[in-house]
Amino acid sequence: MSRRDFLKTGLMVGAGLGLSSILGKDILSSAGIITPKRWVFLVDTFKCVGCGLCVRACKLENEIPYDVPVTRTWVERYVVKKDGTVLADSPYGGRDGYLINNPQGIVVPQEDIAKAFFVPKLCNQCTNPPCVQVCPVGATYQTNDGVVLVDRKWCIGCGYCIMACPYGVRFFHPVHKVAEKCNFCYHRITKGMKPACEDACPFGARHIGDINDPAHPVADIIKTQRVSVLKDEFGTKPSVYYLGYDSLIR
């Protein structure tokens, strides 16, 4: 056998084995023997300092006009006064960080503050997404790995999905004139990268993960620690989990 024939035979055998492996994986997955990937997100509110770097990174990554007050992700500030008053705001989604102690434009003396914290928010990629159910043209759909996407080519801008979302994460894109929202940076995570917001966070407050991978640290935290989801009573089954949840969160 010549060197050329040897290499040709080797490539054919290798391709055959690779194809068999792929087919085998699909068969095992269909049979429930291999659990498919399921994307989830973990937000650690204890680590968020409200710097706004995640919001800025998201806008740049996903072509959201920087100076327009719409965002795929945002950070809310909560200040609870000792008299029980709760002040909460998110100017420009917290894009510029919270450098001044003036929630809702009110300067609160330090001695009057009982507690204060920041809460990053993003699309919850619901397991039962009401936005998908109401879309009349199928422009909003759910992938097999749990992420809800919007097809800009099909969206007619009717706004039903924006009204149906109980978390207020959807908005009209000011340029494309279609529904817009966070998608966990699907174009990045499907290539093995982290979402832009996670990459930009210097404090480790944001983490993407696969809930079906028992070796993944995010899956381990969600399954073994006390975590919460937003508005659990709606039955949408969010895929964004919070460490340090507070009942005051809107």
Image (cartoon, grey):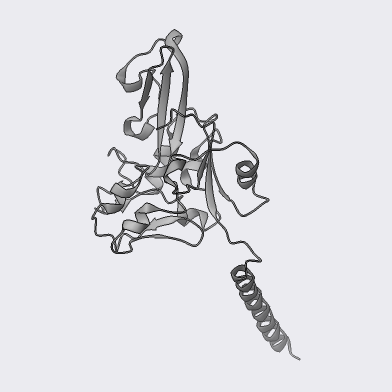
Q: Which of 88 and 201 is in front in this view?
A: 88
Which percent across, then down, holds residue 43?
Answer: 52, 38
Q: In which quarter of the image is residue 109?
A: top left
**Residue 66: x %, y % from top left:** 32, 40
- Residue lying at 66% horizontally and 66% vertically, measured from the top left: 33
Residue found at the very far bottom of the displayed protein: 1
Give the camera-side residue of 33 and 236. Answer: 236
Q: Is residue 95 visible?
A: no
Answer left or right for 57 relative to 223: left
Q: Quadrant of the N terminus?
A: bottom right
Is residue 178 visible to the viewer in this orientation of the structure?
Answer: yes
Q: Where is residue 3 in the image (x, y as percent from the top left)?
A: 73, 86
Q: In this view, does 98 lie above or below 106?
A: below
- Find residue 139 and report its horizontal and vertical position in percent: 33, 61
Answer left or right for 79 relative to 44: left
Q: Is 237 rendered above or below residue 88?
A: below
* Screen quadrant of the C terminus: top left
Report the label total: 0
Residue pictured at 35% horizontal, 18% vertical: 102
Q: Residue at x 42, y 10 (%)?
A: 112
Which quadrant of the view contains residue 136? bottom left
Q: Nearer the viewer, residue 153 or 62?
A: 153
